[in-house]
């Protein structure tokens, strides 16, 4: 096993940054008080949580007091789908390419008797707007469309989709899963016009197990967890102060100071990687086109090879890549069949996902190793 590590699976998760880990360690050992306790030290923790909630909100242009901490993206998405109040049997529209933490709740709501419709996607993983429009009627109570795709990095024009929905069904609730968008592109929940927006800290160098759901004031939603009344009664349970500290610090590093720099660094990396792959490797299918995509994802399909076989071959050289949604890699990605790839490419999908920790000097080595491994793996598969 190679000692060198080139980590290109940042859409699955990222390394917790040193600054985040240090602050969290302090929060655990010094700021360990229960934020609901009455003595001053605990009140300070509670005040600090309020401040961080407000900082995260303003990074997303969300008004103060409309952000609820969750255990991550999955919980935020489940809350959006299950806890919103919807007339029995009403129509729910969900993108065909949504993450399983939206897709599986949608199937459950279907089993409960809702009229759940899945909006088809284009070959770049974003919703087909014309097909989406056909699904709208005045019985739509909830729509859930992701901001950026975890499989391709494609960005949906959420603002335009919200406007289409409002025209036909003004009271419908619009949720967007922003897990792959936050800290990758500027996010302004107010101008997007969404009612609900999910995020997860471990996608941008924060800790796992913490995320948030933005809930616009006036949205009809009930609590997920009942108990001590934390999170304004939306989600009871002692707040995870260290996780919130880590979330806020990661967000501060990702959005407040570095979004533009990181964007251009990751875009340059992606462009160079694509250029090298396209010129040096025979006949790849590029799934991520270069317009309207988050800067950190490049998904391509190699010919005559299985993505997971190539993944393991690259691992021997210390190169870690993804083959799509890590959270569902134990079963065949539903996504694969939607991309319209031919028989020789359809099993060869590989997702390279960068963070600002990657350096463009890695690319030559990565492409050289891909070439080397493909030469062996495809030797006997050529027809
Ligand atoms: N939504 C998207 C688009 C994701 O990519 C992920 C994780 O891969 C999730 C939701 C789930 O987030 P979490 O791991 O915080 O539960």
Image: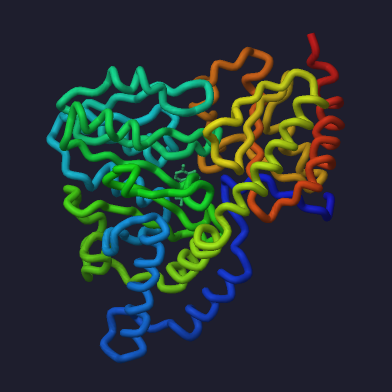
Q: Is residue 4 above or below residue 84?
A: below
Residue 197 position within the rendered picture, expressed as x and y whole percent measured from the top left: 35, 48
| 99 over 58 or under it: above or below | above
Work out which residue is located at the far left of the displayed protein and give it: 87
Query: Where is residue 120, by image quadrant?
Result: top left
Q: Position of residue 238 (x, y in %)?
A: 33, 72
| Image side of residue 30 versus residue 198, left or right | right
Furthest-top residue in this view = 383
Which quadrant would the C terminus be assigned to in this image? top right
Q: Residue at x 36, y 58 (%)?
A: 70
Q: Is residue 110 visible?
A: no
- Image point 39% across, 55% down: which residue? 60
Q: Nearer the viewer, residue 311 or 145?
A: 145
Question: Along the line of sight, which residue is nearer the eye, 335 or 111?
Answer: 335
Colour style of the rendered protein structure = rainbow
Q: Where does the image place residue 248, in percent across and percent down from the top left?
A: 46, 66
83 with respect to 159 (left or right):
left
Residue shown at the point (46%, 28%) measured from the top left: 126
In the rendered image of this protein, does residue 218 appear above or below residue 54? above
> Residue at position x 16%, y 37% from top?
171
Q: Is residue 380 left or right of residue 182?
A: right
**Res. 218 in view:** yes
């Amino acid at each position: 096993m190679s000692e060198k590590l080139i980590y290109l699976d940042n859409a699955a998760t990222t390394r917790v940054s040193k600054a985040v880990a240090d602050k969290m360690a302090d929060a655990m050992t010094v700021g360990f008080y229960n934020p609901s306790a009455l003595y001053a030290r605990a009140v300070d923790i509670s005040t600090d949580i309020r401040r961080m909630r407000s900082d995260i909100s303003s990074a997303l242009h969300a008004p103060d007091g409309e952000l609820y901490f969750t255990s991550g993206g999955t919980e935020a998405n489940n809350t959006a789908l299950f806890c919103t109040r919807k007339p029995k049997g009403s129509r729910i529209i969900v993108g065909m390419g949504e993450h399983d933490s939206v897709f599986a709740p949608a199937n459950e709501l279907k089993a409960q008797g809702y009229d759940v419709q899945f909006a088809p996607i284009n070959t770049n993983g974003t919703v087909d707007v014309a097909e989406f429009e056909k699904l709208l009627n005045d019985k739509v109570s909830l729509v859930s469309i992701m901001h950026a795709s975890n499989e391709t990095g494609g960005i949906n024009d959420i603002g335009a989709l919200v406007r289409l929905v409002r025209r036909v069904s003004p009271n419908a609730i619009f949720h967007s899963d922003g897990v792959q968008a936050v800290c990758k592109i500027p996010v302004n929940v107010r101008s997007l016009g969404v009612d609900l927006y999910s995020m997860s800290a471990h996608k941008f160098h924060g800790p796992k197990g913490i995320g948030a759901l933005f809930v616009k004031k006036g949205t009809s939603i009930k609590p997920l967890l009942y108990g001590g009344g934390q999170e304004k009664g939306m989600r009871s349970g002692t707040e995870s102060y260290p996780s919130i500290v880590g979330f806020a610090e990661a967000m501060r590093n990702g959005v407040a100071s570095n979004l533009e720099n990181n964007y251009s660094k990751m875009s340059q990396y992606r462009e160079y990687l694509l250029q090298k792959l396209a010129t040096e490797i025979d006949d790849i299918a590029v799934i991520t086109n270069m317009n309207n995509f988050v800067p950190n994802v490049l998904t391509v399909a190699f010919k005559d090879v299985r993505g997971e076989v190539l993944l393991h071959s690259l691992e021997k050289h210390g190169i870690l890549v993804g083959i799509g949604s890590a959270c569902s890699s134990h079963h065949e990605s539903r996504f694969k069949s939607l991309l319209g790839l031919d028989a020789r490419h359809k099993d060869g999908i590989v997702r390279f996902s960068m963070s600002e920790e990657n350096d463009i000097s890695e690319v030559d080595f990565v492409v050289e190793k891909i070439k080397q491994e493909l030469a062996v793996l495809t030797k006997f598969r050529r027809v």
